[in-house]
Amino acid sequence: MFSRHLKNQRGMVVPLVLIVFMVFMVLGVTALSMGTADYRHSLYQDHKMQAFYLAKSGAQTLSAYLIEKSYHESFQNMNQLIENISDKTSDVASFGDGSIVITTERKTENGQQKIDIISTGTYGNVSETVAVTLLIEVQSGGGDFNPSSEENALVTLNEDAALALELTGGAFLNGNVMINATKENSIKFRGGGYRIRNGSLYIPHTSEPHFVIDTDKGDNFSNLPPEYDNPNLGTGWINDWAFWRDIEVSPNGVKFASMPTYPSAAYPEPVFPQFPRIGDLPVPANLDYTTPWIEGLYYPILQDGYYNSIVPSSSRTITVDMAGGDRIIRVGNLNLTGGNIELANKGENSTLYLYVDNSFSMGSDRTLNYNGLPDNVQIYYAGTNPVTINGASRFSGNIFVKEANITLTAGANMKGNITTLGTYVNVSGGSSANGMVLYAPNALVEMAGSAQILGSVIANRFVRSGGGNAGIVYTPTNFSIPGDFFDSTTNSIDVQYVVNSWR
């Protein structure tokens, strides 16, 4: 019986063996698949880690560089460095089988300036992104303020002006020009020749040249280099526009930049000082200081003091004796239309501080600190009567005007700086300024005739007409605007990690 049953089961041996074999084969394939998956996962994790380390090393390297630079660089250089790298994407940097790309994004949060450094590392076909946020703080105090370090012939700050810049006739600007213009036809060019030479015209990223620039040179002027295409606005959008006949191209032309604002760290607001109290100054017997004929023609001021007026006449010269130090004079009216002022016995850092209440003017062929250093004279003018420097007069010093209009005309020659909170400055005739920073953030600045400024101008708006071969010629200057023209002069930028900076 049993043997017969066993005989009947013999036919099952082969299928059973096959089943067992198939089971082991499936188990083997499964084991092999699991091993392959584990290998792929391990390889992916390895590439992911390599990509992460590449990304973090990129962010760390740029962060450490900026932080280290901030310890040593001047305010101007550090400000320019941050401006140059802000809102940019780097080229791909390759490292063996990996690569890094870094993007920066500048922002303002709760009144604080910050910059995000976003680094993407790629290894194999795996990418990882690491971001870090840095805090940018302006450290104030000490030193003088010199906007010409921006290396622009002209900056205009008014974003909403219907006319931000106008150059007509033979007018030109020599150097970089930064115009915060967004309105239609708010930049106007009229007349032959290049209006901007040896520099670029910078406009906001959001502005379109063919929208903001108005020219009289026709409708088109061939194609422009491809670097002027803006990918956000479409290929070729900037081509075929005649304003290129107004601007020297390659490597200059129209460029885009983040526009400076006022007031800001780059362009701080001047703070007009309180005048010394009259009761705190000696009051001389001759409250109205004049220059009648006397033997020797020597007219000294030997001490600090308050005067109703200082009015030299008959081409005579008042000599302010500095006694090796500073001199403080407050005067109601300073009238140099008939005579001059010179400084004597100056110390290494001597400064004549002139506080003028009502009027200040210089006339034909008059001098104030002629052949002296601009740092030796600082004039604070609080009056509303226009300030006039004209008639081939020669002045070396710094002027801070609270609100009055300013006119340099008819051959006036100034060496030094003008800072004004007023709304109008006129430079015309054959007047010239050598190595001057004209800091007029609220003013319309007009130039005409053959007037010339060798230096730089920071204005609200700017208009220049005529002039043949005259205009603004950017010239680096050693004459800084005095630090005490500002409440606390910015002199450094500090860069540090914010709290919980990495992500």
Image: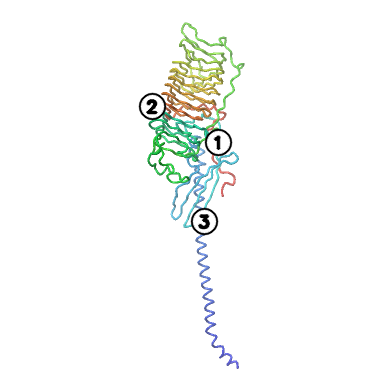
Spot the residue most to the right.
279
Q: Residue at x 46, y 54 (%)?
A: 98
Residue 325 horizontal/vertical position (percent): 52, 19
The three-letter code of the residue at mark 2 reads Asn
Residue 267 horizontal/vertical position (percent): 52, 32
User: Badge 3 local density, few (<14 within 10 Å), some, or many (20+)?
Assistant: some
Circle 3 SS class:
helix
Residue 473 in view here: yes
Q: CA distance from mark 3 to mark 1?
A: 37 Å
Residue 420 horizontal/vertical position (percent): 53, 25
419 vs 21: above or below: above
Name the residue carrying label 1.
Answer: 138
Q: Residue at x 40, y 44 (%)?
A: 226
Residue 318 horizontal/vertical position (percent): 49, 13
Q: CA distance from mark 2 to mark 3?
A: 63 Å
Q: Are marks 1 and 2 in contact (CB under 8 Å)?
A: no
Q: Choose top left, top right, bottom left or bottom right for residue 255.
A: top left
Q: Are marks 2 and 3 in contact (CB under 8 Å)?
A: no
Q: Which mark is residue 49?
A: 3
Residue 81 in view here: no
Of the residues tagged 1 and 2, which is closer to the observer?
2
Mark 3 vs 1, N-terminal side: 3
